[in-house]
Amino acid sequence: MKYTEKTSNLDNSSFTGKIGVGKRDISPPAGIYSRNWGAAKRNTADGIHRALYLHAVTFSPLSGGEPFVLLSADLGWWKNMLDENFVRHHILEVLGLKIENLILSLTHTHSGPSLSRDDTDREGGDLIKSYLEFLRDAAVDLIRKTLAISEEGFLTWKYGKCDLAINRDLYDSLKDMYFVGYNPDSSADDTLLIGRITNKSGKMLAVIVNYACHPTTLAWENSLISPDFIGALRETIFSHTGADCIFLQGASGDLAPPEQYVGDASVADKHGRQLGYSCLSTLESMLPDERELSLKKLVESGAPLALWSQTEKIASPALEAKKVNVNFNLKPLQKLAEIEEELQACTDPVQIERLRRKRGVRLSVGDRDSVEVPLWVWKLGNSIIIAHPNEAYSIFQMEIRANFDKRPVAVINVANGHIGYLPPKYLYDKNIYAVWQTPFAAGSLEILINISINEAIELLR
């Protein structure tokens, strides 16, 4: 019986090459400055809820060539680009990596240590510089070891779903302003992307989890260093698969758990298990490496039946990277000297925290009217990775993925730096935190979306 040939296009053995996976405990020293909330009553943590980790994944052609290095660190954000450069550029220089071949992403926990040497004058701030030096040395050592143990393997992707993340832009009509908290009246992007890394023998080495959700379960009442929900996520995946979990924070500018800003670490663990079970469900639905479902034949029974079976699908060894600079206009901003003057006169701890963040942003963009912000685009087989320094709203990943049908596209916020939010243009006339905080003018997110899509299309040609 003749029929139209079809394949599922659901499972993609996206990349084959030499792949290495490694991790390192990067929990900070006791007493380091770790106040991340203006409402916090303490400057340092009392202990550690779960260890913070640095994970490395390396990709290299089987025939030899320049390695690609993907790092994920259980850390919050860079308060200015100077400290980020202090770490990442050291890694590039020592290892001789091309700038386009390294992505250093942060999971964005809000319960980690400060990464700013500007906080040296705070309680525990004297430990920050040595911690940054430890981070960059740990990264160099981990990359070297990961490259040394790399082996022939596969990276296979599949999309799933998880409803942990909700919209966090809550409008209050009485105050005519938005609060950063659960908005039950708006939908949220629940897309989950899983990357399964296996060796040639089929052993699962690691699971990449790309999901957009702010790790803000724990807040000002929390007294512990913590990766937030990401710790229990890893534990859940490891306990069922024996594989490490690498978390890549997605475009989560407007997404967070519904229950957040608590001091109870068990709530963060509950969130992590929820995401972990969604990941396990997606993993269970995946086909073996280099396999796909194809329509094999039609069978006449009590009903006309379509029989699908596994067939071979050769993985691609394609490995390319691009770094492009995207020009953003800036909003009218206070000059650095004006912010410094305000900061010197301020005594309110909440306002001091806001002014320090504002100063960090101004240090990153300089006293000018526009700034060039880097964007990284990788091709791994038939998949795409898009990474950038800022906190884009979820429409960023939704628009990009919509342009590539079911092709796997990993989108990473807070990668290779951090400056500010990227909310959509229609929010710029609203009284909302993301618009207060960002230095970027209205329309910047839309510019980034268009350039990201165009650059990804160019790489796939």
Image (cartoon, rainbow, N blue to C red):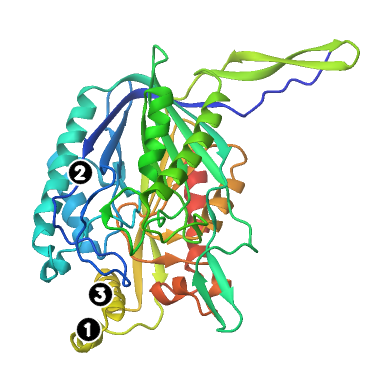
Tell me which residue sits at (31%, 76%) in the image.
354
Q: How many marks?
A: 3
> Foreground residue, 197 or 459?
197
Give the image location of residue 121, x and y in percent.
11, 71
> Foreground residue, 348 or 108?
348
Separation of disc 2 and disc 3 at Cα?
25 Å
Q: Which residue is mark 2?
A: 26
Dot 2: what SS?
A: loop
> Foreground residue, 69 or 113?
113
Q: Which residue is mark 1?
A: 343
Tell me which residue sits at (53%, 41%) in the image.
192
**What kind of residue is marked 1?**
Leu
Q: On the image, which quarter does residue 170 sit in?
A: bottom right
Separation of disc 3 and disc 1 at Cα?
7 Å
Q: Is there a contact, CB below 8 Å, between mark 3 and mark 1?
A: yes
Give the image location of residue 42, x and y in percent.
23, 66
Of mark 1 and mark 2, the one earlier in the sequence is 2
Whether 101 is drawn above or below 182: the answer is above
Separation of disc 1 and disc 2 at Cα?
32 Å
Whether 28 is drawn above or below 440: the answer is above
Q: Is there a contact, CB below 8 Å, between mark 1 and mark 2?
A: no
Dot 3: what SS?
A: helix
**What kind of residue is marked 3?**
Arg
Q: Which mark identifies residue 33?
A: none
**What kind of residue is marked 2?**
Ile
Q: Residues within 10 Å of mark 2 (few under 14, many from 20)?
A: some
Q: Is there a contact, CB below 8 Å, between mark 2 and mark 3?
A: no
> Foreground residue, 224 or 247?
224
Tell me which residue sits at (45%, 70%) in the image.
434
Can you see residue 321? no
Left or right of 5, for residue 210: left
